[in-house]
Structure formats: structure tokens, C-alpha cells
Image (cartoon, rainbow, N blue to C red):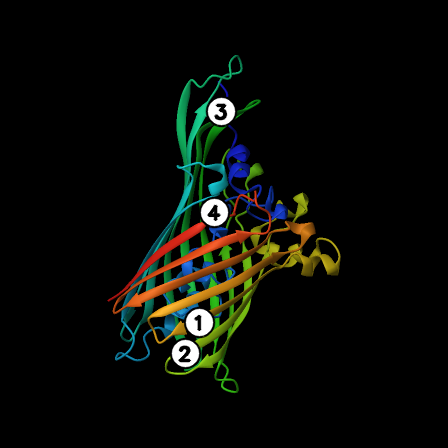
Amino acid sequence: MKRFMIVTVSMLLFSVSLPIFAQGEATGLFLLINPGARQGGMGEAGVALANDVNALYWNPAGLAFQYENPETQSRGEATIMHVNWLPQFNLNDLYYDFAAARYYLPGVGTVGFGIQYMNYGEIAVTTDQSPDPVDFFTSNEMAFTGSYSLKLKDNLAMGVNLKFVYSRLSPTVGVSAEKGKGIGSTFALDLGILYHPGFAKRLSLGANISNIGPKITYIDKEQADPIPTNLRLGFAYKIMNSEFNKLTFVYDANRLLVPRDEEKRVESFMTFFLSTWGDGSVSDQFKRFTHSFGLEYWYTNLIALRSGYFYEDPNFGGRKFWTFGGGVYISFFGVDFSYILASVDDHPLANTMRFSLLAKF
């Protein structure tokens, strides 16, 4: 009996939605799907504008600044998001969910918890003798994240995430003489920092390294796959910051810290921080960065309008798309949405709509 191999499931999801250079370099790529309809409306940028509960993903250091004034800020906050992934494929059981919450503990700092869940849907089992399905199984992946953040100074904060990653792509895998389960797990670490410079009151600088951790083993340790360690750098600048009108510009740069060279990927994940910069020319190193630009406008604290642009070098994926979004906040409750307008009509990310709910308590 032959089942769909792990790589088949992975390529179905990511072959056209994530960087081409990521294919075959890492597993657990669902960890790179950006949650939060708010940030999704700003070109998928948010490492330096981490001022809501979604900071748990974008930059955990931002959680430390979210309860500075008890009169205007809430001690706790929670969010949920659901999105049908790759809508162009019309696969109703291919979807992504995200939920997170944070809470301030006096004398301790801010703690948080998050869940990412990717459902790949139902996969058919066939035999070598016939293409007709003889059985079915479901594939999914998830990550559970615990977060902690505190201020090092009044304008400087640091955050850390500890996550458990579970990947269930297939209950059984049979490839030549190798047989086993397409199920694996690992632990990972995220480290974030957020800085509000004293010399520029309207500027915020952020950095986050996510998914630092051991490889995932599916069949044997010799073929273990690295998880997608990612570097995110960015800034946010408040162009306008009056009582009724606020306008902020954001920019993020991302780079996957997994070597493209297959021989280097055999090494320990701790060496990736250096070895990944040795792949290709100096020019290639900069081209491997993706770029996100975004604008967010608020009228008072009730209505938000957002727009952004995402760019990736044609030699390293070539994704380019505009994003639009908005939000409505009433009292302790808010609703955000975002929409991806791809440059190519039949692009699988085109018409992706995200909705997220946020509640303060």
C-alpha cells in the first residue's frame, strides 16, 4: 500500500504561497503564516507595531508595553482568527486558525498563550495497483506557544516565546525500504526586542528571531528536517498622532535562516545563524529578504483603515501583492479584516480574506 508522501502534502500548501527557496529547506512552514487581520492589511508587517495581543507572534517584546496606563489600557486581551487558505484551490478543508491571549501580572510582567493550527484536509490512500482510494486520513499541524515579556527600561522591552510544534502529515509513510509515520514534533524558541528611542518619540524599532529549535524527525534522524527559523526586522513611525487622527507607517524585512545548501542543513540548527549567510553572493543575501510596507490610519480609537504592499525578489520566490484592510472597535471589542490583491489574477493567494476578533478584559 502506498500513501501520499509528506512532501506531497507540503508542496500542495506552500509551492505557490511561500518563498521558492523555502521548499525542501524546512518543514513546519505553517509557522510562517502570519496571523492577525490587522497586520495582514498592512502588507504583513508588524514587528515594530506590536501593540496588540498579536504581538505574541510578531514580536513578543511588544506585550510589555500594553499595560502602562490602567485608565486607558486593559490588563488582558484575546484574539481569534480563521482563514480559508489558498482560496483559488476551492478546498474547504484547507484552513488556518490562530488564537492568542495575554495578561499582565503585577510584579511579574506580561504572560501570553497562543495556538496555531493548520488543517490540510482529507488525503486519499491508494495502492500501486489502482488509483482508486482505499482509505482516507487527515493531515494537520499545530504549535502551542507560551510567552513572557518585561521591560528592561521604560523604552526598551524584551520578550521570549517557548513553543511546542506537532506535525501530523500522515499516519503511515512507505517509501522503498523505509517505513514509518509522517508524525513528528519539536520545541522552538522565539526572541524579540522592541525599542522606543528617546531621541525620536514617534519611532519604534523591533526585531524578532522565531522558530529557533531542533529539527523534526519523521522517519529517521538522518533525514530530519529543520524548522523555518526566521529573522524579522522593522520600524514603525507615527506620521500623525493627534487626538482624533493617527497615521502610522510600518516596514518589515524578513529572512529565512535556513541554509539552501543541503550539506549545511545536515549540521546542527545552532550553526544556521552563520552558515545561512554563506549561501551565494553578497547580493543574493540581500535578495533573500522579503519586504513589507504598510500604512494604518485611525479615526479616534473607533475606525481603522489599512493598506500595504509585499515584495519578494523574483529569483527567490517572486511574491508581490497589495493588501487592504480595516477595523471597527467599540468599547472592549474589535473586528479586523484584510484582503490580498495579488498582481496575477490566478495567483493562489488572490482574494484571501482574513477576519479576526479581539476582546479586552
Q: Say which residue appears at 46% left-offset and 65% top-offset.
A: 306
Tell which circle, 3 or 2, labels the residue nearer the N-terminal end: 3
Distance, label 3 to label 4, CA atoms, is: 22 Å
Distance, label 1 to label 3, CA atoms, is: 50 Å
Asked if disc 1 and disc 2 are in contact, CB closer than 8 Å, the reply is yes
Q: Amino acid at mark 1?
A: Tyr
Q: Say which residue appears at 70% left-offset and 53% top-offset.
A: 279
Q: Which residue is mark 4?
A: 30
Percent from the top left, x then y, of residue 171? Answer: 42, 29
Report the side of 37 relative to 69 (left or right): right
Tell which circle, 1 or 3, labels the residue nearer the N-terminal end: 3
Q: Which residue is mark 2?
A: 245
In the depicted view, which residue is nearer to us: 27 or 305? 305
Q: Which residue is mark 1?
A: 297
Give the label, 3 or 2, closer to the camera. 2
Is residue 181 visible in this depiction of the protein?
A: yes
Distance, label 1 to label 2, CA atoms, is: 7 Å
Percent from the top left, x then y, of residue 100? Answer: 34, 57
Position of residue 161 relative to residue 158, above or below, is: above
Q: Say which residue appears at 72% left-offset and 57% top-offset.
A: 284
